[in-house]
Amino acid sequence: MRPEIKGLLHDHIDGSSVVADILPALYAQAKKKYPFGAKEDILEFFKNPHIDIVKRFSVITDVLQTRESLEILGFNYVKRRAKEGYSYIEGKFAPQYHTKRGLTMRGATDAIVQGIRFGEKEFGISVMPVVCIGREADENTGIEIAKIAVEYDGEIALDLVCDEANHPPEKHLKAYALTFGTNVKRDCHAGEWVLSEPKETYKKRLLDNIRTAIFDLRCHGIGHAIPLGSDKELMRIVLGEGIRVAGCPLSNLRSGLIESVRDLHIDRLLDAGVVYTMNSDDDLFLPPMDEVISECDAEHDFSKIQVKKLEENVFRGAFRKIQS
């Protein structure tokens, strides 16, 4: 039984499907030659595992270096998601990648948030911006981004993204500590991937990163958390702490991090009461939500109760509380 998902809790703005719609115009605005032909060319480029992910995204971020371009992105992102039928979204962005032409990280954040707010008013959906630390950044950059989140006083959330393998969660503990006791909601990509060797400790290291995000970074949400459903003790902790889990099943599958979406034990997480949601992650080049829902349902054959939980968990886990 297929759920009807009306919200997204794990959605990267610069990796969203709207980029394909507006990227040619952004290149023209920046007076740069557009490097792609058809939209399919973008997909093939981003699927290339031999190009570092930050470098891949630079073909997008390089034309998002002005206040105007970031406002355009924020506005059109909301427009696209509203057209797709969503009533609530949490859109993630990392300001450290938008400072090549003089913008400060605060200025970049203000610009994209402004575009998002314009979009909210125009299209009538609720959006929680999520400012992210690209974890390859040094400690001071992470602290500066966390300060931006604190200054917004709960209007935006904080996340830690990108290369988990080489930059585990504890690297940016000082940044997260700045938000303790504030209104900032804390999220963290954790338990997505670690270094492949040694193989015998791979799963344990994933679980350790989830524990770090929970106990040290004091997160309200975890992104991915691939092995969570196989650890009953950690599931009980997540449930007891009221931590939401924003999963990205087909992102994990297409990235070769799991062999089957069954490996995520989505049904087990739902039955245990974990606030688990399904998301596309980056639907510019990863499967869109229709495929995520269809493939996960085909593998799990969700019950009516599980479908109801998947639909409601989006709003139960939302960092901005709204009515479902």
Image: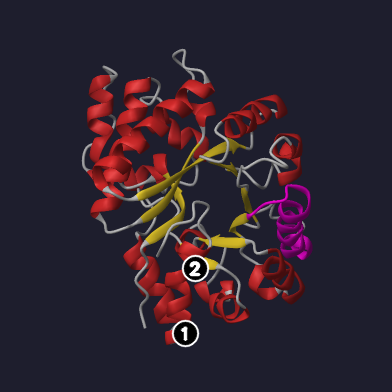
In the image, is residue 9 part of the stretch drawn in magenta? no
Q: Give the image location of residue 5, x and y in percent.
A: 37, 67
In this picture, residue 243 sits left or right of residue 15: right
> In front: 47, or 131?
131
Residue 249 makes an appearance in the image: no
Q: Position of residue 266 (x, y in %)?
A: 54, 75
Q: Is residue 267 left or right of residue 46?
A: right
Q: Residue at x 38, y 50 (%)?
A: 126
Q: Considering only vertical position in the picture, is 131 above or below 198?
A: above
Residue at 29% x, 41% y is 121
Label 2: how many residues lie within 10 Å, few (<14), some (14-19) or many (20+)? many
Q: Which one is earlier in the sequence, the residue at label 2 or at label 1?
A: 1
What predominant SS class does the magenta segment belong to? helix
Q: Amino acid at mark 2?
A: Asn
The residue singled out by tag 1 in the image is 305
Question: Could you tell whether 151 is left or right of 128 in the image?
Answer: right
* Picture coordinates of residue 312, whole percent (x, y): 45, 70
Q: Is residue 203 above or below residue 64?
A: below
The amino acid type found where label 1 is placed reads Ile
Q: CA distance from mark 2 to mark 1?
A: 12 Å
Q: Which residues are magenta?
A: 199-220
Classify mark 1: helix, strand or loop: helix
Q: In the current view of this chain or complex, which residue is farthest to the top?
A: 102
Q: Which mark is residue 98?
A: none
Residue denoted by label 2: 313
Counting from the top left corner in percent of width and height, residue 243 is at 64, 61
Taking the image as shown, residue 259 lies to the left or right of residue 182, namely left
| Residue occupying image coordinates x 53% and y 23% | 105
Q: Secondary structure at mark 2?
A: helix
Q: Quadrant of residue 241?
A: bottom right
